[in-house]
Image (cartoon, rainbow, N blue to C red):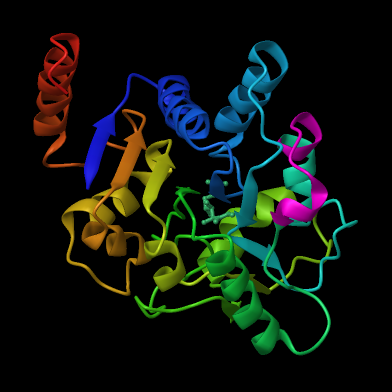
Amino acid sequence: MKVIVCRNAEEAADLAAREILAALAAKPDLVLGLATGSTPIGVYSRLIRAHRERGADFSRVRTFNLDEYLDLGPGHPKSYRAFMRRHLFDGLNVPEDRIHFPPAEGSGLADRCARFEDEILDAGGIDIQLLGIGSNGHIGFNEPTSSLRSRTRVLTLTAKTLEDNSRFYSPGEFQPQMAVTMGIGTILDARRIILQAFGAKKADAIRAATEGPVSSFCPGSALQIHPRALFLLDPEAGARLSMREHHLRARENEETLRREGRL
Ligand code: F6R
């Protein structure tokens, strides 16, 4: 696990986009795991800019989104499919049939969730999984007490998550209580993970995820056992880390080695 406390959210988005674009240059048929929410928007705008201004080609990329609300159809403006169209896919050249979401409508959901897992395997597994984190430590929609080896499934959102996300709904508007999410086990199968977190509201979750015990009560803590998990934080999200100074020093040391061409 590597933790970088960036100067601000912009720098974190620059670093995450740079990692993705370098991986794309090395592997044009990159398999990306994607998140929604406010956190990844900066990365998505940078990927769109790289596509428009520098010809970054996403035509062979496959994407798998982490989660979707139960029963919000793809045409619903609050669905995660609509979010991804608005913030990423409308600006890139990923072919429609290479974009995947967990099944969130109709019946046979358990079987179709298992099929979604098979689709990830058939694509060769996820190369880079982009994550945000909930203020309660959730990753994807894996709420506290989700099994650390869970797979894609239907689940009920906690009152905390509903409250955090109520900002997207006007009073009286229907807000879904259930969702379908990749499991923690699914996320841990990705070859690399980049988790971004911004703002003081995430400081406790980041401390629990990186310095607390590995526990299903903080799903983000599962990343401690992943060999290539990168946390990109702004100073507010990293403010409660007891290892903050160490992370800053480690970054400087690595930059020195990189400048010297040794890393
Ligand atoms: C969304 C997702 C969630 C969010 C988390 C943070 O696809 O997987 O885990 O990453 O709720 O949301 P924001 O970024 O809105 O703070």
Q: Is residue 106 within the magenta segment?
A: no
59 above or below 50?
below
Residue at figure coordinates x 78%, y 57% from the top left: 79
* Residue 48 at least partly seen: yes
121 above or below 85?
below
Q: In which quarter of the image is the C terminus?
A: top left
Q: Where is residue 14 in the image (x, y as percent from the top left)?
A: 46, 22
Q: Position of residue 175 (x, y in %)?
A: 75, 65
Q: Nearer the viewer, residue 99 or 34?
A: 99
Residue at figure coordinates x 67%, y 17% from the top left: 55
226 above or below 106?
above
Residue 106, picture quadrant: bottom right
- Asked if residue 208 lies left or right of residue 117, the reply is left
Residue 244, picture quadrant: top left
- Asked if residue 252 lies left or right of residue 24, the reply is left
Residue at figure coordinates x 46%, y 50% from the top left: 127
- Please report the bounds of the magenta region as a residue range: 88-99
Q: Nearer the viewer, residue 12 or 206?
A: 12
Residue at figure coordinates x 38%, y 38% from the top left: 200
- Which residue reaches farthest right? 75
- Asked if residue 68 lies left or right of residue 129, the reply is right
Residue 176, picture quadrant: bottom right
